[in-house]
Amino acid sequence: MLDSMEGGETGAGTTAGTSGARRELPLVYACSGCSSAAQLANHLAVRLDRAGEAEMSCIAGVGGGVKPLVRMAQRAQEQGRPMLAIDGCALRCVGHSLARIGVEPTRHLLLSDAGVRKLAHSDFDPRQARQLLLQCTAQVRELARQAAAPARGAGHGQPRIDPLAAPPHRDAA
């Protein structure tokens, strides 16, 4: 079902075998929990990766403190590589996992703010997935274009406001 929605695989590399061309793409992290919203977030990231629009990395490894994956996220931020975090719900597990290692994504999408319902024991809506994939593809292309353009004061860590982006999360002291 997933491949039939957006076409076949492109043969893009994986995080473990990252080529130079893949390292130029925006990095994407997504929730992959058990709800329909979480699985939609994961689906979007996988589709972006397979289409060669972004490079997906493993948020479970970041959250679990797996050193090569933590270093990859930190290095991406240090080098100004665009980073997209996709969370399915208001728990914001992806955002929290990145924050624990001192990383702030360039853009943070919260699918529940885009009208995605979190359902247990259910699949996500394929029509909604197609619509959101178009929006996410446009966003990662914009991130890539901004990263390729000469710096004009809008650097990494200053996310552009858009309708799918989650509001900044502030932890209470």
Image (spheres, rainbow, N blue to C red):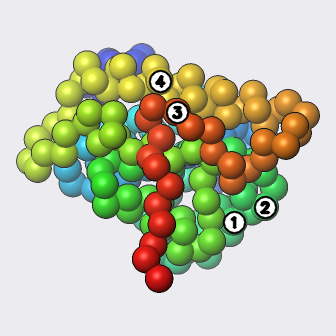
Label 3 close to label 1 by CB (< 8 Å)? no
Dot 3: few (<14), some (14–19), or many (≥20) neighbours within 10 Å? few
Q: What residue type is labelled 4?
A: Gln
Residue type, numbered disc 2: Glu
Which percent across, then down, holds residue 136?
Answer: 49, 29
Helix, strand or loop status at disc 3: loop
Q: List x then y, in percent, for residue 141.
A: 64, 26
Q: SS class of the residue under badge 2? A: helix
Q: Distance between the residues labelled 4 and 2?
A: 27 Å
Say which residue label 1 marks: 74
Given contact means CB atoms under 8 Å apart, are the residues at marks 1 and 2 in contact? yes
- Front tag of 3 and 1: 3
In the picture provided, is 113 more to the left or to the right than 30?
A: left
Which image quarter: residue 36?
Answer: top left
Identify the mark at residue 135; answer none if there is no mark.
4
Q: Which residue is drawn at 78% across and 61% down?
A: 78
Q: Residue 78 carries which label?
A: 2
Q: Quadrant of residue 146?
A: top right
Residue placed furthest toward the right? 150
Q: Which residue is drawn at 38% across and 58% down?
A: 92
Q: Are marks 4 and 2 in contact (CB under 8 Å)?
A: no
Q: How many labels does the image show?
A: 4
> Between marks 1 and 4, how big is the CA–CA gap?
26 Å
Q: What element carries label 4?
A: helix
Amino acid carrying mark 3 in the image: Asp
Earlier in the chain: of badge 1 and badge 4, it is 1
Q: How crowded is mark 2: few (under 14 residues within 10 Å), some or many (20 or more)?
A: few
Q: Name the residue under label 3.
A: 162
Comparing 43 with 103, the one in front is: 103
Between 103 and 21, the one lying in front of the other is: 103
